Image (cartoon, grey):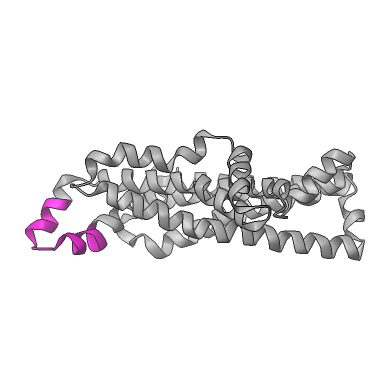
Amino acid sequence: MGTFAVKTHRYFLYAIIAVLGVVAYRSGLRTYLYDPFEREYLLELIVQHVYLVSASLFPATILGFATGVLASRKRFRRYAGMAMYLVGLGQTVPSLAVMALAMTFLGIGFPSAIFALMIYSALPVARNTLVGLLSIPREILDAGRGMGLTPMRMLWTIELPNAMSVILTGFRVALVINIGTAALGYLIGAGGLGDLIFTGISLMQPEKLLAGAIPIILMALFGDYLCGLLGLLLIPKGLRIMPTSDHGS
């Protein structure tokens, strides 16, 4: 059953890419990209978009991870709800409003967009870090204490490896949210692929709209794939969810 699910997921991705190719051909996107100026401009916007995502996701991951770890500690556990509420304030407000608020303090451009995206992306990492650490079976923790491990040693050798699968799921959600929301950075002068999307909408030019939307979709798919590879590096082999054979299902 697991192998069938993996194959289905792969074929689904292939189908999405094929559909995007057909849409790009029928909408005139291919002709649009034949223009060297437009192609160069598209590459510039892709670089800006990747910069927005990477520059905001890195501090968001650190903030979310640190918050989740601290909230899971016994002395701070009573404040876990408050900590998650404070970290999640960014997602209770529409993303465009968060960027507008950031713009009032940091001005127009990259700093405001990066700060807003960081605030907007921290919650999934923080929440999944907390849930992953608190869901470790007590028997495993008692075994570590019985071996005489210090709290810090327990965290790095027992708790984090057992919680890493859940933590990476939160990181994957934050990455996908960040890639999509970064398109709004164009509205506050931060550039990115939102430039083509909103220009295509306002001018009713589907080729421009797709020139901005399709790279964002492909970025999200590629980011999801990289998260899978990251799981192979960070999750111990014995703790991975391995696909079972069709004969065993």
Q: Which residue is nearer to you in this view: 73 or 188?
A: 188
Residue 242 visible? The answer is no
Q: Position of residue 187 (x, y in %)?
A: 72, 46
Q: Position of residue 88 (x, y in %)?
A: 44, 40
Residue pictured at 32% horizontal, 43% vertical = 131
In the image, is 18 to the left or to the right of 147? right
What are the residue bounds of the magenta stretch? Answer: 141-158
Q: Is residue 136 magenta?
A: no
Residue 95 visible? The answer is yes
Q: Residue furthest front?
A: 105
Q: Position of residue 52 (x, y in %)?
A: 62, 57
Residue pictured at 87% horizontal, 60% vertical = 38
| 34, above or below 26, in the image | below
Residue pictured at 34% horizontal, 42% vertical = 83
Instruction: Name the chief secondary structure element in magenta.
Output: helix
Q: Which residue is nearer to you in this view: 23 or 135?
A: 135
In the image, is 206 to the left or to the right of 131? right
Q: Position of residue 56 (x, y in %)?
A: 55, 56
Residue pictured at 63% horizontal, 42% vertical = 100
